[in-house]
Image: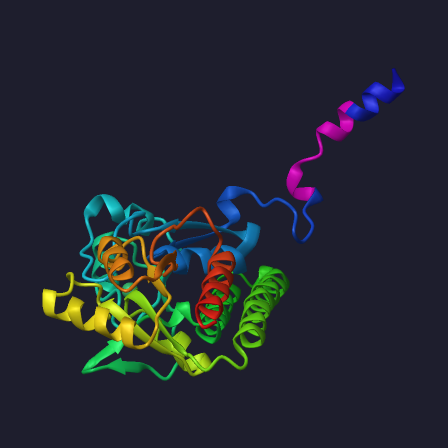
Amino acid sequence: MQRRSLLAAMALIPVFQMAVPGAAIAAEKKVKVAATFDAMAEIAKAVGGNRVTVSTLIPPGVEPHEYSPRPGDMRGLAGADLVIKNGLGLEPWTEKALKASGNGRAKIVVASQGVTPMKIGAAIDPHLWISPSGAILEAENIAKALEAADPAGAAVYKKNLAAFASGIKAASDAFRKAAAGSKNRTFVTGHAAFGYLCRDFGLKQVSVENVYAEGEPSARQLAELVSFCRKNHVKTVFAEELASPAVSRTLARECGAKVVPIYTMESPEDKLSFTARMSQNLKHIAESFR
Ligand SMILES: [Zn+2]
């Protein structure tokens, strides 16, 4: 009887009194993050852990290049504390959409802040997150913003950031080891999304589409790609879910290469985490050099 009343008394202790770092946090106390697209959402979740709720503005399967906000997609902005975007010209609509949402207090975080931008022709290449060093820089900027919004979580964000960075570094180190000694440093992919990754490792990308993933190549461009692949004995053509996978398959068939998936993290892919996709990309690129 006594034991039962003790248990009953314990059940009455409010949850918040037992709060310890890393323990469950009430939903209303979490930092509400609206991320523009999948990569930003995934990095925010990795760094924010259980202290944040993250919504993604651009829906799954929708290409972030040339995207224009639809009101239904922007619901996450209304209650957001932080809006996380990549920047580098990828989401020029963010400020206007936030204003239109009536949320006057959310802070916009530009995750790419501090990078030396790369150019493709006259345009800025936005694909920083696909590079290991870029992903870590973006995670650091996101961690800083989360810490400013929620100083009580500083230790948690620091720990989560270290874990994220160490996962990315492990994938990067494995790549350097696997690709060491490969004379071939060129790979063929869907759209020119791998510039920063190439800069990290001294590689070269050849793509079916340009940097904006706009439109399929002309017959002449495709013929040039086929001739490039034949001349360079390309054995692997990487295909992306959102950028002309059918053209990549045609190209592979024409030059006797195999098709291997590559991830741009612009949308959810194969239910894999950000780090898992980064690791797969690097592993497959290294394999394609052999
Ligand atoms: Zn892209």
Nearer-the-camera pick, 25 or 197 = 197
The image quadrant that residue 155 belongs to is bottom right
Task: Identify the residue at horizontal 62%, vertical 44% (top origin).
Answer: 24
Q: Tell me where residue 59 appears, x and y as whole percent.
A: 29, 48
- Residue, far right: 2
Q: Tell me where residue 91 appears, x and y as whole percent.
A: 26, 64
Q: Tell me where residue 114 appears, x and y as whole percent.
A: 40, 81
Task: Identify the residue at horizontal 51%, vertical 43% (top origin).
Answer: 27
Q: Is the residue 152 above or below the residue 132 in the image?
A: above
Task: Identify the residue at horizontal 24%, vertical 52% (top origin).
Answer: 101
Res. 268 in view: yes
135 relative position to 57: left or right: right
Nearer-the-camera pick, 137 or 239 = 239
Asked whether 9 falls inside the magenta stretch, the response is: yes
The image quadrant that residue 160 belongs to is bottom right
Nearer-the-camera pick, 262 or 42 = 262
Q: Tell me where residue 230 appears, x and y as whole percent.
A: 28, 72
Q: Which residues are magenta?
A: 8-17
Asked whether 248 falls inside the magenta stretch, the response is: no
